[in-house]
Image (cartoon, rainbow, N blue to C red):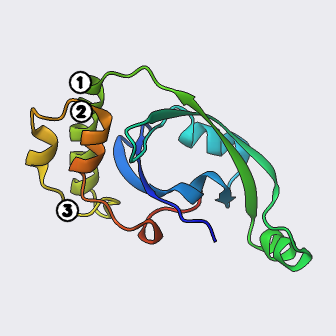
Amino acid sequence: MMEYQTLVMFDELDKKLIPINEGVFKIAQFSNEKNLNRKYAGNLVLFSNGEIKEISQVKITGYYGEKVLTKIFSILNSTYDIEVKLANSEISIESILGKAREYLKNDLESVDPYMPPQDFSKISDESIKDFKALYSAFSLPAPEDCLDVMV
């Protein structure tokens, strides 16, 4: 079993931050390619090493699983293997900090927030000069407690 890390996705549709399990790039459920692209293409993803990527495309490659029984289960549950294309982003640290504050506030004020409670002073801190420092400023759940399928 592969070890996945927690990433931070900037949801451009709902203007929220969503902690995601890296495995989210492998599986989708209850959706089609058009909806997946409408919902996820254009979203930025912040990695723990400070990389920031933009989801440029989500492509369904077939039903999920290798074995026949897994595929049957996949068909019954509308679960698909997907390929997510990530492109380099040219966004500046200043722009991403503005988004991070706005999207985090929106998420935490929502009825069912994705992010755990945060210390806002950490992301308002002037010492954040790069994406890795921004990632470190977030309180993030363990990968197993994050979104792990695209819907």
Decide: few, some or many residues near mark 2? Use Cα within 10 Å; few <14, some 14-19, many ≥20: some
Indicate the quadrant where residue 102 lies. Answer: top left
Q: Position of residue 49 (x, y in %)?
A: 40, 43
Indicate the quadrant where residue 141 lies. Answer: bottom left
Q: Secondary structure at mark 1?
A: helix
Q: Is residue 97 left or right of residue 3?
A: left
Labelled pair 3, 2 in contact (Cβ < 8 Å): no
- Residue 37 is marked as none
| Residue at x-position 11% and y-position 39% | 124
Q: Earlier in the sequence, mark 1 or mark 3?
A: 1
Decide: few, some or many residues near mark 1? Use Cα within 10 Å; few <14, some 14-19, many ≥20: few
| Residue at x-position 59% and y-position 37% | 38
Q: Is residue 18 above or below residue 30?
A: above
Q: Position of residue 23 (x, y in %)?
A: 58, 59
Q: Is residue 40 left or right of residue 106?
A: right
Q: Amino acid at mark 2?
A: Leu
Residue bearing mark 1: 94
Q: Amino acid at mark 1?
A: Glu
Distance between the alpha carbons at the discs numbered 1 and 2:
5 Å
Q: Is residue 26 left or right of residue 50?
A: right
Q: Is residue 20 left or right of residue 149?
A: left
Q: Secondary structure at mark 2?
A: helix
Q: Position of residue 130 (x, y in %)?
A: 27, 31
Q: Earlier in the sequence, mark 3 or mark 2?
A: 2
Residue bearing mark 2: 97
Q: Is residue 54 above or below residue 120?
A: above
- Residue 117 is marked as 3
Q: Amino acid at mark 3?
A: Pro
